[in-house]
């Protein structure tokens, strides 16, 4: 009986935490947000390799996770932008916390400076029963990428990129690509089966996209497009150089 109680207690705690997440997400950001799916042809992207200067200890890669690999894409097409991709991305890199909704994911930088560099780390206070940390693995004038560290709910990489719109002279296109597996079985149940982590995560990045559009001086062309592609895990994803 005591053994059964020890097994049931974590599940009850998880369900209660999940219910709390659902209520807060709905009240704060889920209700007003909408998203449309991307076409399969529009998300043929690959994660970058991790450079030596960003490897160090504590990396939590897809090989360390469980379950399928999720490739998620968030796209915001922006009309009438008054700032260049380089200018806007510089602001995002220097003020990452201001683009993420604190109610869902609050970023705190370990390094005491504004500029973003490879090797920098951010602690993230995440809505729900888990927090996490990430490390910067790539910084370019119009893009940057992060990898998860030990203890993060996911195991993988996420990349942010802002570029000229392919069909609009004064437009921009902002995209977020992530490739990740769940950290463990509990996270997998919450994300895939209860759908709570999935909704909280989606709304974090939808708001992020909206704030990038605002920072550009332009406006969104329609809604933020969102796609999640579930793939079998292949160990070659996110390799070391």
Image (tube, rainbow, N blue to C red):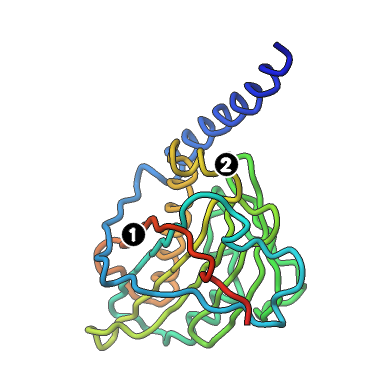
Residue found 39% across the figure and 74% down from its top: 45
- Please state the horizontal and vertical placement of residue 232, each as a whole percent of the image: 43, 57
The image shows residue 203 at horizontal and vertical percentages of: 43, 52
- Residue 63 x, y percent position in the rendering: 59, 60
Query: Residue 187, located in which quarter of the rendered image?
Result: top right
Q: CA distance from mark 2 to mark 1?
A: 23 Å
The residue to which callout 2 is attached is: 185
**153 sits left or right of 1 in the view:** left
Q: Position of residue 69 (x, y in %)?
A: 47, 57
Which residue position is annotated with label 1?
227
Q: Is residue 111 above or below residue 126?
A: below
Residue at the left extreme? Answer: 167
Task: Kindly indicate the quadrant of the structure image that contains residue 161.
Answer: bottom left
Numbered disc total: 2
Residue ID at (59%, 24%): 12
Name the mark on residue 55. none
Provide the secondary structure element on which disc 2 rests. helix
| Relative height, residue 240 to residue 75 (above, below) | below
Q: Earlier in the sequence, mark 2 or mark 1?
A: 2
Vertical placement of 226 versus 215: above or below? above
Which element type, helix, strand or loop, lies under badge 1?
A: strand
Nearest-to-viewer mark from 2 and 1:
2
Quadrant position of the C terminus in the picture:
bottom right
Question: Residue at left 29%, top 86%?
Answer: 170
């Amino acid at each position: 009986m005591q053994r059964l109680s020890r097994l049931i207690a974590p599940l009850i705690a998880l369900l209660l935490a999940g219910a709390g997440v659902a209520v807060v997400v709905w009240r704060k950001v889920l209700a007003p947000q909408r998203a449309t799916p991307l076409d399969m042809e529009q998300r043929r992207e690959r994660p970058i390799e991790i450079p030596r200067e960003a490897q160090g200890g504590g990396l939590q890669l897809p090989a360390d996770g469980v379950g399928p690999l999720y490739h998620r894409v968030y796209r915001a097409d922006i009309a009438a932008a008054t700032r260049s991709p380089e200018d806007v991305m510089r602001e995002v890199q220097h003020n990452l916390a201001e683009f993420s909704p604190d109610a869902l994911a609050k970023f705190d930088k370990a390094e005491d400076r504004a500029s973003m560099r490879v090797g920098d780390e951010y602690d993230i206070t995440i809505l729900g029963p888990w927090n996490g940390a990430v490390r910067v693995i790539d910084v370019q004038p119009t893009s940057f990428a992060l990898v998860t560290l030990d203890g993060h709910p996911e195991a993988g990489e996420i990349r942010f990129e802002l570029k000229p719109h392919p069909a609009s002279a004064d437009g921009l296109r902002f995209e977020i690509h992530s490739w990740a597996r769940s950290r463990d079985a509990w996270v997998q149940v919450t994300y895939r089966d209860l759908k709570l982590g999935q909704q909280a995560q989606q709304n974090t990045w939808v708001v992020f996209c909206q704030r990038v559009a605002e920072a550009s001086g332009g406006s969104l062309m329609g809604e933020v497009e969102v796609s999640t592609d579930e793939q079998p895990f292949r160990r070659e994803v996110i390799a070391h150089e």
